[in-house]
Amino acid sequence: MEAISRYTVSFGASLAITSILSALLVVLKELNEDSVLAWMKGLTSHHWITHGLFMVIAFFAIGWGLAKMNKGEGLKMKPERLVCMIASGVVIGGLIISGFYLVF
């Protein structure tokens, strides 16, 4: 089996993490419209632009940080596990948002 690059693993893991962070930020904004949402609206012309910028920055920062782990060798993970991690992160993020809107 051929190994996948440290960047593929690191940024794949970052995708999973960022998906969950994005969902949590949606919930945080919705629960704090007068503070967090208003602050995010004030940073850019719309809170979704701010949200997107935060997530792009988080994606690259997390991915780059994970790629630098293990003395620059990055995370070690089998491709099957990475695919499972990405799918799980996206599904969990979707469930957080769906669950929030179903309850509130």
Image (spheres, rainbow, N blue to C red):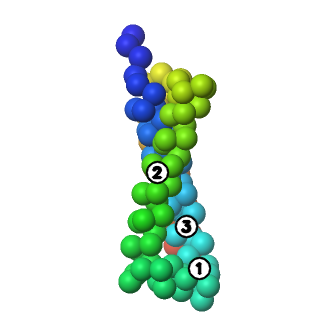
Label 2 sits on residue: 59
Quadrant in which the N terminus appears: top left
State which tag comes first along the sequence, 3 or 2: 3
Callout 3: SS:
helix
Residue 5 at x, y percent in the picture? 41, 25
In the picture, the disc for residue 46 is none
Depicted 50 relative to depicted 34: above or below: above
Q: Are marks 3 and 2 in contact (CB under 8 Å)?
A: no
- Residue at image coords 57%, 63%: 24
Quadrant in which the C terminus appears: bottom right
Depicted 33 relative to depicted 87: above or below: below
The quarter holding residue 8 reads: top left
Instruction: Give the residue type that dot 3 points to.
Output: Leu
Label 3 sits on residue: 25
Gap in angstroms between the C-alphas marked 2 and 1: 21 Å
Callout 2: SS:
helix
Instruction: Give the residue type that dot 2 points to.
Output: Phe
- Residue at image coords 41%, 66%: 52
Q: Of all residues shown, which one is farthest toward the front?
A: 71
Residue 7 at x, y percent in the picture? 42, 32
In the picture, the disc for residue 36 is 1
Depicted 1 relative to depicted 60: above or below: above
Instruction: Give the residue type that dot 1 points to.
Output: Val
Q: Decide which of 104, 35 is in the foreground and name it.
A: 35
- Residue at image coords 42%, 65%: 53
State which tag comes first along the sequence, 3 or 1: 3
Q: Decide which of 85, 47 is in the foreground and name it.
A: 47
Q: Of all residues shown, which one is farthest toward the bottom?
A: 34
Q: How crowded is mark 3: few (under 14 residues within 10 Å), some or many (20 or more)?
A: some
Q: Residues within 10 Å of mark 1 (few under 14, many from 20)?
A: some
The quarter holding residue 38 reads: bottom right
Res 88 seen here: no
